[in-house]
Image (cartoon, rainbow, N blue to C red):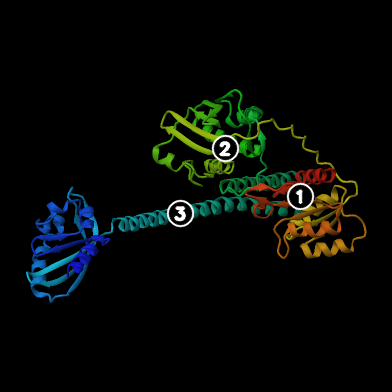
Amino acid sequence: MEWSEELSGGLLQAAPDAILVIDGERIVLVNDRAEQVYGWPRSELVGQPVEVLMTDASRHLRVERRRLIAASPPGSFGSVTTTARRRDGTEFPCESSTTIVETPHGRLIVAVVRDISERVHAEREKDRLRAEAQAHRSQRLESLGQLAGGIAHDFNNMLGVILNYASFVIEEAESAEPDVSMIAADAKQVIRAGNRGTDLTHQLLAFARREVVRPQPVDLNALIAAVQELLRRSLGEHVRLIFRPGPDLPLVTCDPSQIEQMLVNLALNARDAMPSGGNLVIDTGLADGRVRLRICDSGRGMAPDVLERAFEPFFTTKGSGEGTGLGLATVYGIVTQAGGEVSITSEVGLGTTVTVLLPAGAATAPESAAARPAATGGHGETLLVVEDEDALRDVAGRILTGAGYRVITAEGGAQALDLAARHDGEINLLVSDVVMPGMLGKELAERLVVVRPETRVLFMSGYAQPILASQGTLEPGVVLLEKPFTANDLLAAVRSRLDG
């Protein structure tokens, strides 16, 4: 019998959970784990009323415990999830399983108590993360809804202008005595509305970080100095532009055209915040190993609720027709795509400061870029133009034919390969859309240059990032003409690619 008592005692102490033996009123036996869980030494815990381990909310169970001991047969088992209390007064969640045991000294309750604090904490953390994710999804959906509404509003306005002025052009041209000056004026309105649409699509792509970028080492001070005159014209005479370049700045790797767009957007915002005039200060420097660009205006500033929403797409405090609400959203997209950070501080009546931090790039200055080639015509070269949009294919063919090129047109990749196979002479240049049904422009180009290695390639697209670019950066060797393009844009790109 002695070995059995030793064995039962060893098992009691080795148990992973706290074990308490209660005579109905007081604690008569505990194991080592009970000391650890409750923070009481065994010598002080034994003899204590069990209520010392209970929270105030669970002490009403004392009467129920007495009834349980009296009414339940031996071996009865019960389990409950509750809250217990340690010696220092802290509370913790636990699972308590109880059994009624008949002994020569009367009935006893054996309680096995497991501390489930870590499990409860993990479940609460999961619930918190789930709630945060749901909140983020709701915010994204709200932002997308706002974005879609703003896009529809602005594009419907532009389409209304384009369609109506195009009708005016047709009516005037078909009249018995057309007024050429009126036709020209109406056509200019169509072009103006189309350019607004072009700007808006570029802003949307920059905001969404989907625009193809052409990063290169850039001297930020030199870039700002080069666009100062443009910024001054954008600001007007009532706003004074001050540029304070920091010394010895490392180069940054970015798309210079996007940085120019960002500066113009910020300058226009500053101008609108200073209707009575003021100062716009641009300064550069170093901060935490990164290149800092700071734009400060002395305008009216932003209230806290406006500042909180400053980067939201289509959020604007301007009146109807005075802005798209994409200026700061575009800035955010450009900076983030360049691997940087942007922040805004502002106080009502004291102005606004936008701070941009860009990672330092190459250590050596870039070679000066070659001047953009003039939009000169062709010398009888043969071009294969592939575009699935009939109207745009006709426009491109008309521009190129009129400029002295021989033009073969196709509406898709399969037709283009067939025409190329039946063409006797050289095909000097493939001008292909990127996204087309049946065969993408990239596949067409790869298949064509296998059989015609002399053929150079010029892609054209309004949204080529998923096909031609890796993480938003144009792949080496790829030349892209972005839509929508003008006749001069197309002719310059073709001439540049041919002269390569």
Amino acid at pointer 1 = Pro
Residue on which the image places disc 2: 265
**Image: 20 above or below 189:** below
Q: Secondary structure at mark 1?
A: loop
Disc 2/disc 1 C-alpha distance (Å)? 41 Å
Q: Which residue extends farthest front? A: 2
Instruction: Compare residues 364 and 70 and report the one nearer the observer.
Output: 70
Q: Amino acid at mark 2?
A: Asn
Relative to 440, 498 lies left or right? right
Q: CA distance from mark 3 to mark 1?
A: 50 Å
Task: Using the rendered view, name the quadrant where residue 63 is placed.
Answer: bottom left
Mark 3 closeness class: few <14, some 14–19, many ≥20 residues within 10 Å = few
Q: Judging from the image, what secondary structure is the residue with disc 3 in?
A: helix
Give the residue at mark 3.
Answer: 142
Mark 3 against mark 1, which lies toward the viewer? Answer: 3
Q: CA distance from mark 3 to mark 2?
A: 24 Å
The earlier-in-sequence mark between 3 and 2 is 3
Which residue sits furthest bottom? 73
How dense is the environment of label 2, judged by Cα within 10 Å: few (below 14), some, or many (20 and up)?
A: many
Q: Is residue 348 above or below residue 169?
A: above
For mark 2, give the secondary structure.
helix
> In the rendered view of the protein, which quadrant contains the C terminus?
top right
Look at the numbered discs 3 and 2 and tell me whether their residues touch, using CB distance below 8 Å.
no
x then y, percent, for residue 36: 23, 53
Q: Quadrant of the N terminus?
A: bottom left
Is 42 left, or right, of 237 in this rendering? left
Q: Which mark is on residue 178? A: 1
Across and down, in percent, residue 27 comes to 12, 60
Residue situated furthest right in the rendering? 424
Q: Determine which of the numbered discs, if any, sits on residue 386 in the image.
A: none
